[in-house]
Image (spheres, grey):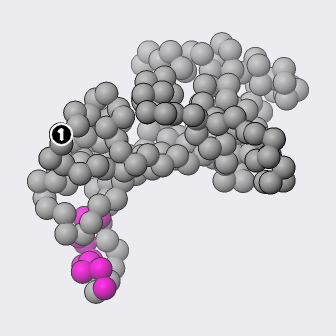
Amino acid sequence: MQSTYLQQYYKDEVVPALRKSRGYTNIHEVPAVEKVVLNTGFSAGTEKGQIDDIVKEMSQIAGQRPVVTKARKSVSNFKLREGMPIGAKVTLRGATMYDFLYRLIAVALPGIRDFRGVRDRLDGNGNYTLGISDISIFPEVRSDSGKGSIGMDICISTTATTDEEGRELLQQLGVPFRKRSASTATASA
């Protein structure tokens, strides 16, 4: 399979830059993006036609068909029965993952109105999760005014062992992190 632009950029630019800044002696020490998981949830009472539309839109965004997740057990307060569809998820790896990341970083995020960057908070192990409230920021999705907005979680798993390594990797790849002000930096410390 042919490598995508971001994948080639990672090999040619990011790896040497990380080796120089972090002092890695072995190429396998350099952190990399392992996988990207896209996840969305919907109400248990969602109709079959709407579920099919959500799956279709997610497959257009991801480039592969998502898996419909089902409830593992019944919860009467939520009118939820075991086996009812409650969400959809797709795991991206390899060239498809890099293609999605490039479209997210270069097209979708800058297209958000009044966009100032994404939070730079990682999970403690070098992985990053981003929540999007409306998937219509992706150009593949046509926004119909009749439908409600669909949100999505994007989890970027890296091989980094610390948040600093993961943050530097994602910055090198072009993730537009929000600039920290002096008051915010001291408050979080």
Image coordinates for residue 10, horizontal then vertical, percent: 62, 20
Q: Is residue 172 left or right of residue 45?
A: right
Label 1 crowding class (10 Å Cα cut-off): few <14, some 14-19, many 20+? few
Taking the spot 58% from the left edge, 39% from the top edge, the residue there is 118
Q: Is residue 170 left or right of residue 162?
A: left
* Quadrant of res 82: bottom left
Image coordinates for residue 23, horizontal then vertical, percent: 88, 26
Q: Main secondary structure of the magenta part?
A: loop
Tell me the quadrant of the picture where the N terminus can be found.
top left
Q: Nearer the viewer, residue 166 or 131?
A: 131
Q: Is residue 114 left or right of residue 141?
A: right
Q: Nearer the viewer, residue 100 or 175?
A: 175
Taking the spot 36% from the left edge, 34% from the top edge, the residue there is 137
Residue 158 magenta-highlighted: no
Where does label 1 land, which residue?
Answer: 144
Q: Which residues are magenta?
A: 77-86
Image coordinates for residue 175, horizontal then vertical, percent: 59, 30
Q: Please indicate, yes or no, whether residue 104 appears anywhere in the rendered image.
A: no
Taking the spot 84% from the left edge, 24% from the top edge, the residue there is 21
Direction top: furthest residue:
12
* Quadrant of res 166: top right
